Image: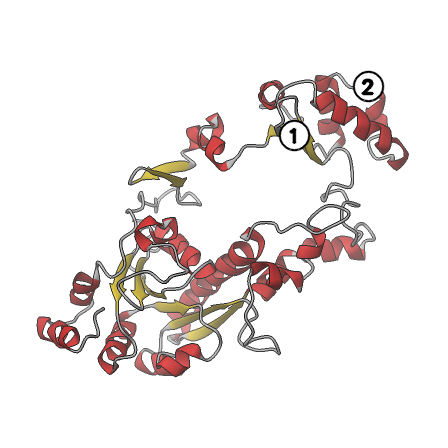
Amino acid sequence: MGPLAGIKIIEMKGIGPGPYAGQILADLGAEIIVVERASKPNSIAVPSALDINSRGKKSIALDLRKPEGLEALLKLVESADAIFEGNRPGAAERVGFGPDVCLARNPKLVYGRMTGWGQTGPLAHSAGHDYNYISLTGAAAAIGTKDQPTPPLNVVGDYAGGSMFLVVGILSALLEAKTSGKGQVIDTAITDGSAHLMSMFHTLSEMKAWNPSRASNMLDGGVPFYGAYETSDGKHISVGPIEPQFFAEMIQKSGMPESFIADQNNPKAWGEMKKVFTETFKSKTRDEWASLFEGTDACVAGILDYNEAINHPHNKARGTYIQVNGINQPAPAPRFSRSECSTPQAPHAEGVDTQSVLTDWGFSADEITVLANAGALT
């Protein structure tokens, strides 16, 4: 089920944005085969059977240091629509499954590469993590308090700037291959993707409507009507009525001075406005404010943690969260009117599907025995 049903993709086991990209593709119906380097997890990786990013995938374990293991991977490549890896530039080539080798075996193959710095450039071979990558694209500098940047989890770089752009690249190349009959290589860099995410702020800057100093703009906490406020129970609400009619509704429903409505965009009034907002919102609990505002156009919402979010009535009504193997997690997204996505299968342990995948992908019993005897199935 799902719009990608029938698409076969090989995921070379990695961490971070690669596995999440594979989860998205699996959720959408693609058959994802994860190639593990060994049948036990890497010391820095979450065990596959516990990893939501591994849901809906099959896992095989090949020792690529053995010629037989490498040849088995390349035979799988012959039947695949796409393969992707997240190694430093040149690593796949050294092992023997770089793009040239794989495309020689399957000219229609889409070969995705997921890195922080990209395949080229002076930093391409350097180590780094999400926060380093978004530091070079303006994203990190824009997030935080006036005094100091704050790491925004790794959703901005790894997942928004990395995984999502890898998925878009793979799907675009698969569509193009239907016309051209030719595969190609996708160079996905978190620096490129996170730079792309900053497009709107380049526009606003050109219009003299954005200041590079943090907490001095409409969307970064620089105005009183767009930000978080503490409530009487020590929790917080988000306030974001940018449009004047929404701002007016928020002021009226909260019982704050109606004179604020005319002064919404008057910076001289913001100091007093911020003070009153702070005092007012601290007069009720988060859930009391949520009860007052939810369902209105005031653009105020309770700030929930990820456990609380599961039980919010809106999320429950839409089925935003599901349970797989007793573990709460987000449901596949987006929704499709006809090619509906199925409930993902629970993640599998490392290498548990080796025999069945090799059989399904055309390996004979004798070939599998040869691989096992050579120690290539780990």
Q: Specify the quadrant of the image occupied by residue 38.
A: bottom left
Q: Identify the image quadrant of the C terminus.
A: bottom left
The answer to whether 123 appears left or right of 104 in the picture is right
Q: Amino acid at mark 2?
A: Pro
Q: Specify the quadrant of the image occupied by residue 363.
A: bottom left
Q: Which residue is more in the foreground, 177 or 56?
A: 56
Q: Specify the quadrant of the image occupied by residue 111.
A: bottom left
In this view of the protein, can residue 143 be seen by the observer? Answer: yes
Q: Residue at x 40, y 75 (%)?
A: 183
Q: Which residue is more in the foreground, 312 or 7?
A: 312
Residue underneath mark 2: 257
Would you place residue 127 above or below residue 145 in this image?
below
Q: Residue at x 67, y 28 (%)?
A: 230
Tag 1: Cα neighbours inside 10 Å, few (<14), some, or many (≥20)?
many
- Residue, far front: 43
Q: Which residue is more in the foreground, 340 or 237?
A: 237
Colouring convention used in this rendered image of the protein? secondary structure
Which of disc 1 and disc 2 is earlier in sequence? 2
Residue underneath mark 1: 299
Tag 2: Cα neighbours inside 10 Å, few (<14), some, or many (≥20)?
few
In this view of the protein, can residue 249 be seen by the observer? Answer: no
Q: Amino acid at mark 1?
A: Cys
Q: Residue at x 37, y 69 (%)?
A: 83
- Residue 45 position, x and y percent, is 39, 58
| Contact between labelled residues 1 and 2, with CB atoms less than 8 Å apart | no
